[in-house]
């Protein structure tokens, strides 16, 4: 916890460029380690391990270490992709919940020395440490507190083991910029063969001691989830706005938004994967987030003052897929375009100012210098005169966070047609805020008004930016008649395929909705002459037109097969109806089924969200054969569509879904259930 009390000590350590503030110390301030971390803004996440081979998101703990055998692993190639994407580091899942350690730990046998890879001489942390060093980016490490492998989990012995694992990873591999302690504790696991549910008492992991150890071993290392930085509140990368870096020791605060002027500096990190899951799954090769989507996530995270950690999962070769790399680079181009020119840089400024902190600090390109005003100045205003008129549609502001986060609201005016016109207002600023204007503005004079600030405002950055023209990746969706529709902002011809091949200039041109009666993969791209645009791919299950509910335990199951993700089936209309709950569907014809999908409710609550399921198939709607039963790992934190591949295709006309357990409350819900067909 960092309080104003220790401000004096911190202040002494701050850089020379950073002069005495006009206003006295106020509120919570960051530690230098948090300031340095905040400036990293964007880095990679690498989920790699036995789940990459078992096709799971959470291993149970009984997986065979022999599975881990990447055929072409190259840490340097991954680090380079991160570097080229503009990332400042990467964090490796050195141990995920399955307990398998990707380094030769002395704490458990369940580690990489038992894998055939490099004849048991492999060490992924060492490889990534060397690769990051060579590429000039930083290394971070994820060590899961929850361990579904060890028999000692939930007992004292495991706490010692866990602490020792942290000691190993922070001792043997050079500097670690961040250590990541996930909050998941699902309960059940293998636990050395006990196969039971284990619960842990509060403060079981003794994070106080962990933080102390981290401080001793690596004082610069940021402890995520336990001491220095908080979760951004969802696994979609977005954080909330207004956005506070502070939480409060007594009154709490939300992960998404923080707590206004809280007493503890605890900045947020938004996390998300470039795909739906955190680990690599072949079926998601065509579900990579588009450059535009990544850019929007970055705006909603880094553009609100949080750091962004973006997951890039290596496949079984130990490589990143071409689709991930291409999206990442497309996103980088958009971000570079946004930041390419700051129309306010070097602009003349005027306005009230405290000695040594003139308004010119806003536009001098130095993020440490800042503009501040004599204490007590009501609604400070700084005017910025550009050398020539500029057209812009986004603004970026930043506070000198070493002095805390002070601003509650601000507004910006532009001189248009001989008068000041308000073009934007906002709430928090913090380390950084990037806001899009509702329409582009052209002017050579703007002014910034700080309309409310708890503590004299200290503003270090002010930029006027132009947003990139979207790459206009086409959007592929299904209409209510079950046909595939492709939309695009561009008028260039759209070439598509439905057989999984990359569309070439010779591929058919889209001219209207496509029937895809068995589902499949649609790939589409623009061609401007011979110049090919980015490929958009989307997998579709069987269309649901013609499906009928033939039985349901309770509730309106039609809502789960209406292809509308906003409606959902639930068994809670007149009191909780405990799981198991389910329904059966007639597909209208017999098809070769290779898998199912389950989309959890998308309304932001986890009530009734199923994490244990069963699927059965039938040829006649009478006699049922179970074909899949299992767990939807991590569905609560990451409520995305789940895919359930069958071991082998089964021909059937009817399916039955049963929710066996829910993550919250005692009923079952589902937004959509889908069927994947194939051979
Ligand atoms: C979650 C974990 O349970 C996921 O598997 C993943 O590691 C993600 C980053 O954090 O809560």
Image: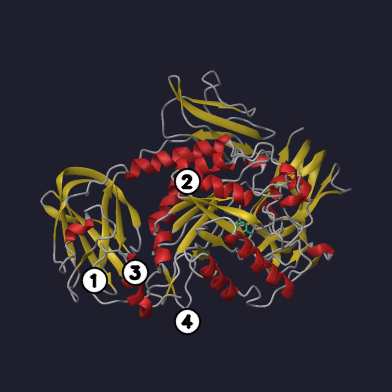
Q: Are marks 3 and 4 in contact (CB under 8 Å)?
A: no
Whichever of labels 2 and 4 marks the residue nearer the N terminus, that label is 4
Residue at 62% from the left image edge and 43% from the top image edge: 314
Name the residue carrying label 3. 13
> Element at badge 2?
helix
Q: Ligand 1 is located in which of the four quadrants?
A: bottom right
- Locate residue 24: give its quadrant: bottom left
Q: Are marks 1 and 3 in contact (CB under 8 Å)?
A: no
- Mark 3–mark 4 Cα distance, whole angstroms, equals 29 Å
Residue at 19% from the left image edge and 49% from the top image edge: 346
Answer few, some or many: residues within 10 Å of disc 3's Cα (few below 14, many 20 plus, some between 14 and 19): few
* Residue at the limit of the structure toward the left, as seen here: 418
Answer few, some or many: residues within 10 Å of disc 2's Cα (few below 14, many 20 plus, some between 14 and 19): many
Answer few, some or many: residues within 10 Å of disc 1's Cα (few below 14, many 20 plus, some between 14 and 19): some
Residue at 56% from the left image edge and 36% from the top image edge: 323
Name the residue carrying label 2. 294
> Element at badge 4?
loop
Name the residue carrying label 4. 250
- Mark 1–mark 3 Cα distance, whole angstroms, equals 12 Å
- Of marks 1 and 3, the one in the foreground: 3
- Mark 3–mark 2 Cα distance, whole angstroms, equals 37 Å
Residue at 34% from the left image edge and 57% from the top image edge: 433
Instruction: Please state the horizontal and vertical placement of residue 101, each as a whole percent of the image.
Output: 69, 56
- Mark 2–mark 4 Cα distance, whole angstroms, equals 36 Å
Q: Looking at the image, is 17 positioned above or below residue 123?
A: below
Instruction: Please state the horizontal and vertical placement of residue 404, each as a whole percent of the image.
Output: 34, 70
* Residue at the limit of the structure toward the right, as seen here: 623
Whichever of labels 3 and 2 marks the residue nearer the N terminus, that label is 3
Left or right placement of residue 632 versus residue 522 in this view:
right
- Near-viewer residue (27 or 617): 27
């Amino acid at each position: 916890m960092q309080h104003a009390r220790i401000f004096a000590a911190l202040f002494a350590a701050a850089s020379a460029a950073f002069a005495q503030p006009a206003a006295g110390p106020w509120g919570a301030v960051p530690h230098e380690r948090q300031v340095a971390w905040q400036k990293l803004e964007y880095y990679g996440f690498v989920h790699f391990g036995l789940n990459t081979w078992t096709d799971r998101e959470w291993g149970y703990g009984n997986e065979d270490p022999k599975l881990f055998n990447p055929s072409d692993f190259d840490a340097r190639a991954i680090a380079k992709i991160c570097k080229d994407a503009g990332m400042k580091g990467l964090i490796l899942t050195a141990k995920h919940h399955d307990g398998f350690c990707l380094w030769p730990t002395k704490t458990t046998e369940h580690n990489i020395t038992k894998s055939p890879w490099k004849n048991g001489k492999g060490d992924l942390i060492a490889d990534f440490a060397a690769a990051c060093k060579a590429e000039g980016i930083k290394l971070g490490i994820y060590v899961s507190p929850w361990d579904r492998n060890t028999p000692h989990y939930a007992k004292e012995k495991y706490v010692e083991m866990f602490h020792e694992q942290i000691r190993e990873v922070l001792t043997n591999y050079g500097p670690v910029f961040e250590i990541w302690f996930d909050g998941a504790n699902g309960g059940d696991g293998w636990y050395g063969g006990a196969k039971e549910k284990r619960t842990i008492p509060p403060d079981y992991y003794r994070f106080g001691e962990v933080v102390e150890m981290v401080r001793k071993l690596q004082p610069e290392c940021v402890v995520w989830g336990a001491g220095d930085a908080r979760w951004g509140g969802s696994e979609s990368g977005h954080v909330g706005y207004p956005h506070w870096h502070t939480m409060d020791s007594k009154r709490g605060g939300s992960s998404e938004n923080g707590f206004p002027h809280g007493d503890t500096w605890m900045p947020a990190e938004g996390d998300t994967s470039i795909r739906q899951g955190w680990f690599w799954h072949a079926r998601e090769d065509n579900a990579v987030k588009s450059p535009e989507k990544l850019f929007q996530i970055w705006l909603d995270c880094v553009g609100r003052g949080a750091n962004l950690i973006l997951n890039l999962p290596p496949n079984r070769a130990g490589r990143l897929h071409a689709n991930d790399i291409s999206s990442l680079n497309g996103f980088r181009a958009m971000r570079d375009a946004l930041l390419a020119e700051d129309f306010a840089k070097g602009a003349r400024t005027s306005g009230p100012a405290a000695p040594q902190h003139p308004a010119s600090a806003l536009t001098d390109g130095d993020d440490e210098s800042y503009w501040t005003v004599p204490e007590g100045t009501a609604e400070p205003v700084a005017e910025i005169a550009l050398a020539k008129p500029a057209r812009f549609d986004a603004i970026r502001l930043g506070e000198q966070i070493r002095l805390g986060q002070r601003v509650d609201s601000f507004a910006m005016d532009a001189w248009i047609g001989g008068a000041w016109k308000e073009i934007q207002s906002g709430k928090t600023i913090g380390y950084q805020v990037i806001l899009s204007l509702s329409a582009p503005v052209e002017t050579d004079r703007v002014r910034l008004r700080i309309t409310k600030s708890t503590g004299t405002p200290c503003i270090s950055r002010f930029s006027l930016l132009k947003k990139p023209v979207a790459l206009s990746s086409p959007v592929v969706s299904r209409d209510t008649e079950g046909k595939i529709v492709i939309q695009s902002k561009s008028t260039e011809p759209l070439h598509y395929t439905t057989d999984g091949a990359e569309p070439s200039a010779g591929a058919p041109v889209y001219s209207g909705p496509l029937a895809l009666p068995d589902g499949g993969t649609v790939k589409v791209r623009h061609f401007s002459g011979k110049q090919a645009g980015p490929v958009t791919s989307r997998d579709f299950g069987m269309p649901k037109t013609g499906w009928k509910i033939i039985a349901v335990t309770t509730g309106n199951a039609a809502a789960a097969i209406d292809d509308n993700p906003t409606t959902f089936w639930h068994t809670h209309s007149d009191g909780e109806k405990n799981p198991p709950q389910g329904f059966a569907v007639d597909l209208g014809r017999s098809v070769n089924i290779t898998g199912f999908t389950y989309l959890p409710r998308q309304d932001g609550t986890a009530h009734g969200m199923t994490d244990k399921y069963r699927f059965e198939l039938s040829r006649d709607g009478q006699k049922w054969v179970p074909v899949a039963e299992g767990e939807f790992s991590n569905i609560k934190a990451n409520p995305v569509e789940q895919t359930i591949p069958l071991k082998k295709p089964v021909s059937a006309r009817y399916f039955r879904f049963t929710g066996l357990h829910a993550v919250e409350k005692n009923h079952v819900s589902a937004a959509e259930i889908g069927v994947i067909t194939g051979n």
